[in-house]
Image: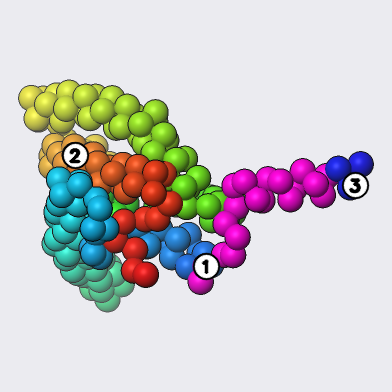
């Protein structure tokens, strides 16, 4: 039995696993980082595909550079609240809502950029050792079967969600400030659109990896 298990394990490793883990295989972030489309595209890649990957990744990077500035008012709001509450015994009625809204906006608007850098949470203890073609195949079909259908449904539901919030003049009920809810819900809608846009780039990268055995834009 033991000999049979060893043979089966060797066969699995030969078919699915890379022969030698690269130096990038030490963390999930590093694994995904090699998928960035900011490097030079393969010379034999169709020009429309190369331009799409590069332009979408540049757009997501620009969005990320803009959205990161949300941290500034977020930090200011929380710092002001702490000093006002602890030193002057004058807590605000808006800091709690502002911190939730800004953090939510930061999370959703930056989700597409995070996808381009591969820093979404994932379990790669097996995937990291797969051959590039197998990684690309897995990613390609997961995008086709789950990612895009799920986000499209989510987008459809969120459009109605935001429209109803605007129509009703919905307000938050957690504090006496009672802010309007449609701005943060609109950020959710925009964030889904950014994810769909970046997903197109990731789909092209996965297809290329599945068919050619290398990630486009990966530095040699």
Picture quadrant of residue 96: bottom left
Residue 3 x/y as whole percent: 89, 47
Measure how far apart labels 3 and 2 are at the Cα level.
51 Å
Q: Which residue is mark 3?
A: 2
Measure how far apart labels 1 and 2 are at the Cα level.
34 Å
Q: Is residue 59 magenta?
A: no
Q: Secondary structure at mark 2?
A: helix
Q: Main secondary structure of the magenta part?
A: helix
Judge left or right: residue 114 versus residue 94: right
Picture quadrant of residue 163: top left
Circle 1 or circle 2, nearest the eye: 1
Residue 23 x/y as whole percent: 51, 71
Circle 3 or circle 2, nearest the eye: 3
Q: Is residue 8 visible?
A: yes
Label 1 CA crowd tier, 10 Å (few <14, some 14–19, many 20+): few
Judge left or right: residue 194 versus residue 205: left
> Which of disc 2 and disc 1 is earlier in sequence?
1
Q: Nearer the viewer, residue 76 or 161?
A: 161
Q: Are marks 1 and 2 in contact (CB under 8 Å)?
A: no
> Which of disc 2 and disc 3 is earlier in sequence?
3
- Residue in the picture at 47% in, 40% down: 138
Q: Which residue is mark 1?
A: 22
Q: Which residue is mark 2?
A: 193
Q: Is residue 17 magenta?
A: yes
């Amino acid at each position: 039995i033991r000999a049979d298990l060893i043979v089966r394990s060797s066969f699995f490793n030969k078919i699915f696993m890379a022969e030698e883990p690269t130096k990038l295989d030490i963390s999930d972030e590093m694994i995904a980082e090699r998928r960035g489309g900011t490097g030079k595209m393969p010379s034999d890649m169709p020009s429309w595909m190369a331009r799409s990957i590069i332009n979408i990744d540049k757009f997501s990077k620009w969005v990320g550079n803009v959205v990161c500035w949300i941290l500034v008012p977020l930090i200011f709001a929380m710092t002001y609240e702490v000093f006002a509450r602890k030193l002057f015994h004058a807590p605000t009625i808006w800091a709690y809502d502002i911190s939730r809204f800004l953090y939510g906006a930061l999370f959703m608007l930056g989700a597409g950029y995070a996808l381009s850098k591969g820093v979404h949470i994932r379990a790669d203890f097996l995937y990291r050792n797969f051959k590039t073609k197998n990684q690309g195949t897995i990613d390609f079909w997961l995008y086709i079967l789950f990612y895009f259908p799920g986000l499209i449904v989510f987008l459809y539901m969120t459009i109605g969600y935001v429209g109803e919030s605007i129509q009703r003049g919905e307000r938050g009920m957690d504090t006496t400030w009672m802010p309007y809810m449609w701005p943060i819900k609109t950020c959710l809608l925009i964030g889904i659109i950014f994810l769909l846009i970046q997903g197109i780039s990731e789909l092209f990268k996965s297809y290329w990896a599945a068919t050619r055995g290398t990630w486009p834009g990966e530095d040699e």
